[in-house]
Image: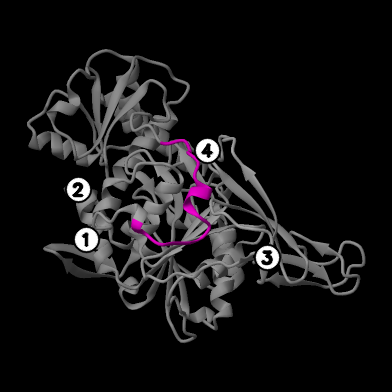
């Protein structure tokens, strides 16, 4: 499809959206061309960083209105050929649409390319965006507010009343989702559209069993059609934060902790099997690369929308186009289906392929603090990230922070200065009968946590919190209350 914005009075034309004509101030309408023909071809045989796979063709397409648009493809065409965007034939297909200035049209196109994706006007919808910590939209930590706004507009066009739409999320354990949604611009979108925003952590939850494992799932998720809206990011623990990972915050805090403690690679696929009526429309408008999923990562500017009824298939295709290894939890959820067998419609996988920066599982925000990460729960991840980032600027001798439960004694070999951060690692250490390692518990006062990590960074041995530290902690709390 080729879109142009046309002035109704003077017939001036733009390739990007405008509200009114800049020349005559007249109203502007959207012109959509759907009948495309190849009018030019350039074959490229020299690779470049963002186009490493060769040879490929750049087609010049022209629609029934005479509008033209370049299109990259790995297929061969001839001048005069009709260019047709094939629609999906299988239920597990993944649609990939490159955004051409208009997120709204990209979402609509992605939905229309898939098989049997329908929304009835009386349907109740739960939109589950990814909003994990307080961060600005440009940081690509949380879902793009423009993405959510466009999705709601598409649902309105399908005739779904705003009363039947609920936007719900919970932040990482230890963060506040209302603060995160406000800073990210999500609450402003919900207010503008008249949509209720709910904090999932407040429940209610309903216990459901899958393959011998019990999940306390957000009740609304069991009685509404779920539109899963992840932001596609690298994740230094899981490989990627995508469609599957976004589903973990549909369960309560206790269940999340248990899922990670027992092994997220095993428990997450079981949760995905329980949630049958899920449609994923993934935000890769920016996306994140590098040391995600928090603010240590950087925007990737992917400029894509991905959609599928199969969350594992979507995550697999995302990894394929970004030339990343498919994570264990995604392979398990996809039942080991070969990524090459997944049907893709819209843009071609090979035409989009180029590598992004992947995450280093050993890095933290602090250059002298290295991670021994074993897929820790959101609470431990949040605690580790907050503590290490607050000590940036204070140099010391190299130490290791141990988080999560998926480790054995061999993971600690050759490392002299280790501190276990969070209850998951401490509990696992007790199981392994490891007692000569410093510990920072989640129950420890926030100031005392920071003081202890600071001592570990700057001193030899295994320091402890002293009575003086406790007095300082109480004084800092008192001062902060007075200031507020």
Disc number placed over residue 52 in the picture, else none: 4
What span is colored magenta in the figure? 341-358
Picture residue at 17% right of the left edge, 35% below the top: 407
Secondary structure state at the residue bearing disc 4: loop
Q: CA distance from mark 4 to mark 2?
A: 36 Å
- Mark 2 surroundings within 10 Å by alpha-carbon count, few (fewer than 14), some (14 through 19), many (20 or more): some
Snapshot quadrant of residue 474 = top left
Snapshot quadrant of residue 11 = bottom right
Figure check: 297 above or below 190: above
Residue 45 locus on image (x, y percent) = 59, 38
Q: Which residue is mark 3?
A: 37
4 or 2: mark nearer the eye: 4
Q: CA distance from mark 1 to mark 4?
A: 37 Å
Figure check: 259 above or below 365: below
Secondary structure state at the residue bearing disc 2: loop
Dot 4 or dot 2: first in sequence order is 4
Is there any visible trace of residue 190 in the rendered image? Answer: no
Q: Verify CB contact (< 8 Å) between mark 2 and mark 1.
A: no
2 or 3: mark nearer the eye: 3
Residue 85 locus on image (x, y percent) = 55, 66
Q: Which residue is mark 2?
A: 263
Q: Which residue is mark 1?
A: 270
Is there any visible trace of residue 389 in the rendered image? Answer: yes
């Amino acid at each position: 499809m080729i879109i142009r914005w046309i002035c109704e009075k003077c017939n001036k034309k733009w390739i990007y959206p405008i509200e009114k004509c800049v020349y005559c101030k007249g109203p502007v309408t959207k012109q959509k061309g759907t009948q495309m023909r190849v009018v030019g071809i350039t074959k490229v045989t020299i690779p470049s960083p963002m186009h490493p796979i060769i040879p490929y063709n750049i087609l010049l397409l022209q629609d029934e209105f005479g509008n033209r648009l370049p299109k990259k493809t790995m297929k061969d065409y001839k001048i005069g050929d009709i260019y047709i965007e094939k629609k999906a034939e299988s239920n597990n297909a993944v649609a990939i649409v490159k955004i051409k200035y208009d997120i709204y049209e990209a979402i609509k196109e992605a939905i229309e390319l898939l098989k049997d994706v329908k929304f009835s006007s009386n349907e109740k919808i739960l939109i589950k965006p990814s909003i994990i910590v307080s961060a600005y939209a440009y940081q690509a930590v949380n879902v793009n507010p423009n993405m959510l706004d466009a999705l709601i507009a598409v649902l309105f066009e399908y005739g779904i009343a705003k009363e039947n739409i609920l936007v719900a999320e919970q932040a990482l354990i230890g963060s506040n989702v209302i603060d995160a949604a406000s800073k990210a611009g999500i609450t402003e979108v919900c207010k503008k559209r008249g949509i209720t925003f709910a904090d999932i952590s407040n429940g209610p939850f309903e216990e459901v069993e899958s393959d011998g494992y019990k999940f306390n799932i957000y009740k609304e998720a069991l009685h509404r059609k779920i539109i899963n809206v992840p932001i596609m990011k690298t994740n230094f623990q899981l490989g990627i934060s995508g469609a599957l990972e976004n589903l973990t915050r549909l369960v309560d805090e206790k269940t999340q902790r248990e899922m990670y403690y027992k092994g997220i690679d095993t428990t997450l696929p079981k949760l995905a099997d329980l949630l049958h009526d899920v449609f994923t429309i993934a935000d890769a408008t920016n996306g994140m690369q590098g040391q995600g999923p928090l603010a240590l990562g950087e925007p990737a500017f992917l400029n894509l929308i991905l959609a599928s009824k199969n969350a594992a298939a979507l995550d697999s295709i995302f990894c394929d186009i970004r030339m990343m290894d498919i994570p264990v939890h995604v392979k398990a959820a996809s039942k080991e289906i070969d990524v090459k067998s997944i049907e893709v419609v819209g843009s071609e996988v090979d035409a989009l392929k180029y590598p992004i920066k992947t995450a280093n599982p050993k890095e933290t925000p602090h250059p002298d603090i290295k991670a021994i990460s074993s897929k820790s729960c959101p609470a431990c991840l949040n605690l580790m990230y907050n503590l290490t980032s607050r000590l940036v600027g204070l140099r010391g001798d190299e130490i290791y922070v141990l988080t999560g439960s998926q480790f054995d004694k061999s993971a600690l070999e050759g490392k002299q200065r280790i501190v276990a951060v969070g209850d998951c690692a401490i509990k696992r250490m007790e199981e392994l009968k490891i007692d000569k390692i410093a510990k920072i518990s989640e129950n420890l006062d926030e100031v005392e946590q920071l003081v202890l990590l600071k001592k570990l960074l700057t001193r030899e041995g295994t320091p402890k919190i002293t009575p003086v530290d406790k007095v300082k902690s109480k004084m800092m709390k008192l001062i902060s209350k007075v200031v507020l």
